[in-house]
Image (spheres, rainbow, N blue to C red):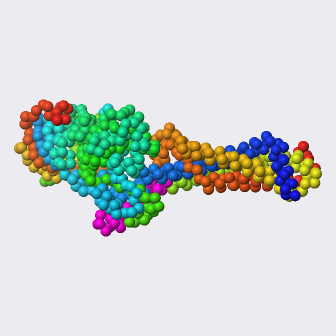
Amino acid sequence: MNRKLIFTAITILILLPAFAFAISGDEIVRRADAAATFDTAESSGEMHITDRFGTKISSFDSWARGENESLIEFTSRAERGQKVLRTENEIYLYYPDAEELIRMQGSALRQGMLGSDISYEDMTGGKDRASQYSIEITDEQNLLGRDCWVLTLRANTRTVPYPKEIVWIDKQDYIVLKGEYYTKSGRLLKDMEVLEIGEMDGITMAVETRISDKMKSNSNTVLIMKDLKVDIKLDDEIFSLEELSW
Amino acid sequence: MTYRIAQTAFKNISRNKRRSILSGAAIAVASMSIVMLFAIIGGMSKDMEANLRNYYTGDVNIRNVDYEEYERFNPVHLTFNIDDAENVLAKIEGVDSWVPRTTFPTNMYIGGSNYGALGVGVDFSREAEYADLESIVKDGRLPEAGKNEMFIGAVLANNLHLKLGDKVTIMSMTASRGTNAITLKIAGIAAFPVAALNTSNFWMPLDRAQYFLQTPGGAQQIMIKTADGARSDTVADEISTVLREAGIPGDVNRMQDMSLMFGLLRLADAVYNVIAVFFFLLGSTVIINTTMMVIFERMREIGTLSALGMHGKELVRLFMLEGTFISAVGAGIGVIIGAAATLYLGRIGIDFTDAMQGMDMEISSILYPILSVPRTIFVYFYSVAIATLATLIPSRKASRIQPVEALKYI
């Protein structure tokens, strides 16, 4: 009898830390989304867009506030002055030669930004995926020398760009190292893979990421972050429609 | 004897004027229809070729050497240098006129929604010599170089509730594979002769299109009209040679080499000819039917003539001559009316604008029939011949029956 009690107690003691420190899929995704969201941020970078005709480089500066507001201004020669403003519910495009702002909606949201593999739709929606998807931890793997969870996300709502996602999230810094994005029927639409991790303004983050739209052949976009400053003071006007056309 | 039979045949015609007039009228209507059908088909074919020449390919066409391979991917960046075209074409004798054009798919952003359209960048000063665009200005004027203006198809403007002076923002892919948008003011409303252009096209100054699409100095295609008497294949060969010698890569094609367009023209030609044959057969049936009925209903007369001693061959000759006289007059009147109507319609045109809404064909919405003299003469002799031959069947049958039998029809 005593031996039985001792065995049970030992088992509980061994397993207790595992239960106490187990983290749910929801929590992993929540932490990953939080890691990618800043109160305010200013960054600059490049998109290396490759298609059947070759590779072109578009550079940009961007500003973000929270999870719903961001502004990208392109600085490369071909697109100089073009801006993409994301507010809580809308995406607006500003072109220097157009006398009105263009609000992206409907199927236009699926277009690639500047012909890249990143669609305007990818920019929509909040970053709170934990409330939009049913999340399940399906595996654990090692990518870029980092241990990560493999999670399968199935959408609870129709307002998200991808009904199913499989993401690889780094256990240490909650960086999404890889992602596969599917239709409801399981067709791969897009994939994403971090090529390099670095540190900017004290934050460990993906500095080089490759995104590939599987609906296009011979196409991929490598997003390279050149600079990042977080928690800086940003003028409220930056994210206003009035300011966009200036 | 033949003269007397001819006299009798002529008398027979005037003996029952109503029957003769009805018979001749049927032949006239059939002949007239055939003449007009040939004229309309001739007009359609000619019109389609003119539209291909003016709005789609030219007699000879130069494009970037890689354009055709990537055409389905909207390769805006694959252009041909206009200065190179200028230098090369100045050396070619058989060139009448040429224009650079760039066609690009766009979205028109109106009231928060996007509407698909086709933009065309054109050098309006060159177009005056090439396609006489002034003649298709329905309202307003042609856009001016250097200004953000557009010349929009009347149906497209109407569908989008746009009018002269309105501003429209257009979005398109650029040569750098990015996107761009520009706002254009409607300077003119176009009445393009082709329904497809009217419903989808707007034209803008080439220099502004080059700026917008980021294709400085280039155009998607150089469309060339050959001079009268010059063969397009000779001109195309000469251009290819000069390009090769100058080391300029370029894809030179004749209208008929640009398979899709010319294939459509050939297909349309074949379809029209099949339709013509059907109408021709229908017309022939009317002539045959009328002639045969006229003879069959005259069995009593045939019986009487036989009883009076007229021989079978004479009977056949009599009715054949009757048919010949009636059809000669009927077909003559039909052909004259058909030719006159064709000449009139060829001047004012037949308006198919409403019927052709939404049709993506290179046929003008106003068709101008073209009278072909050889075809008209052929129709006349054909009608006379078919009516004459049609008398043979019933009259030969009638000639073989005995007078007693023939008199049973009484």
Residue at left offset 50%, top offset 38%: B354
Q: Nearer the viewer, residue A223 or B119?
A: B119
**What is the total number of numbered labels drawn onto the structure image?**
0
| Quarter of the image that includes the N terminus of chain A | top left
Residue B153: x and y in percent read: 40, 40
Expressed as whole percent of the image width and height from the top left, the position of residue A106 reads 32, 37
- Relative horizontal placement of residue B135, taking residue B106 as reference (left or right): right
Q: Is residue B252 magenta?
A: yes
- The quadrant in which the C terminus of chain A is found is top left
Rendered image quadrant of residue B205: top left
Q: In front here: A156 or B410?
A: B410
Q: Residue at x 39, y 59 (%)?
A: B95
Question: Image check: A188 left or right of B294?
Answer: left
A83 vs B100, left or right, is left
Q: Residue at x 8, y 37 (%)?
A: A231
Residue B215 in percent (x, y) is at: 26, 51
Can residue B93 be seen at all in this image of the molecule? yes
Name the residue located 19 percent from the left edge and 35 percent from the top edge. Answer: A245
Q: Residue furthest left?
A: A202
Q: Decide if residue A56 is on the left or right side of residue B61.
A: left
Magenta segment main secondary structure: helix
Q: Nearer the viewer, residue B360 or A221?
A: B360
**In this view of the protein, which residue sits in the foreground, B101 or B66?**
B101
The location of residue B61, given as percent across then percent down, is 38, 58
Q: Which residues are drawn in magenta?
A: B239-265
- Is residue A112 in view from this perspective? no
Q: Is residue A172 located in the magenta-colored stretch of the structure? A: no
